[in-house]
Image (cartoon, rainbow, N blue to C red):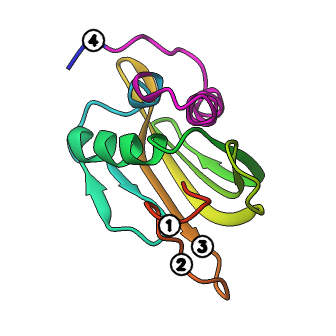
Amino acid sequence: MAAKKQLNGSADEVESAFYDAISRADLDALMALWAEDEEIVCIHPGSTRQIGHAAIRSSWEAIFERGSVHIHPVQLHATHNLMTAVHSIIEEVQRTNDGAQEVHILATNIYVKTPHGWRIAMHHASVASGKPPIDLFKASVLH
């Protein structure tokens, strides 16, 4: 794996960079934000758990094959300590390449402080109760 760029900012800045990379379908920028630990986890709505860089990269690559995804995080609830930050948010999700309606996703982003700055250790997103699950690779709105 290539050396990771130092990010000396906050977990909030990493989160902003995460959603920016998704909106640009920039897989390399997105993956540079994850911790180097192979125990990192990503769970997309209605999907299986992806563990490690290769699995997470592959899952985002499949999502980006259909274009970028616009995700606007709202209603942030954050807890922080010296080494970890946990963000619980609602994601307003819409594909940029179609006219699909907006979907609201509940997400938890966990960040860890590393020698390279704050990095993502886990992203877990799910459809709020009362809504049908999204098939990430077939639906018109993905995440």
Front-most of residues 100 and 50: 100
- Magenta range: 4-28
Give the residue type at disc 2.
Pro
Looking at marks 1 and 4 on the same chain, the residue that comes earlier in the sequence is marked by: 4
Looking at marks 2 and 3 on the same chain, the residue that comes earlier in the sequence is marked by: 3
Q: What element does badge 1 sit on?
A: loop
Magenta segment, prevailing SS (helix, strand or loop): helix
Give the residue type at disc 3.
Val
Q: Contact (CB < 8 A) between labels 2 and 3?
A: yes
* Residue under pointer 4: 3
Mark 2: few, some, or many residues within 10 Å (few <14, many ≥20)? some
Q: Which mark is residue 45?
A: 1
Residue visible at 35% across and 49% down? 59
Q: Nearer the viewer, mark 4 or mark 3?
A: 3
Quadrant that contains the C terminus:
bottom right
Residue visible at 71% across and 52% down? 94
Q: Contact (CB < 8 A) between labels 3 and 1?
A: yes
Would you say 50 lies left or right of 25 here? left
Question: Marks 3 and 1, how far apart in space?
Answer: 6 Å
Mark 3: few, some, or many residues within 10 Å (few <14, many ≥20)? some
Looking at marks 2 and 1 on the same chain, the residue that comes earlier in the sequence is marked by: 1
Question: Marks 2 and 3, how far apart in space?
Answer: 6 Å
Q: Is residue 112 above or below residue 33?
A: below
* Residue under pointer 2: 133
Picture coordinates of residue 113, whole percent (x, y): 43, 31
Looking at marks 4 and 3 on the same chain, the residue that comes earlier in the sequence is marked by: 4
Residue visible at 64% across and 84% down? 129
Picture quadrant where residue 116 is located: top left
Q: Contact (CB < 8 A) between labels 4 and 2?
A: no
Picture coordinates of residue 63, whole percent (x, y): 45, 48
Front-most of residues 57 and 80: 57
* Residue under pointer 3: 127
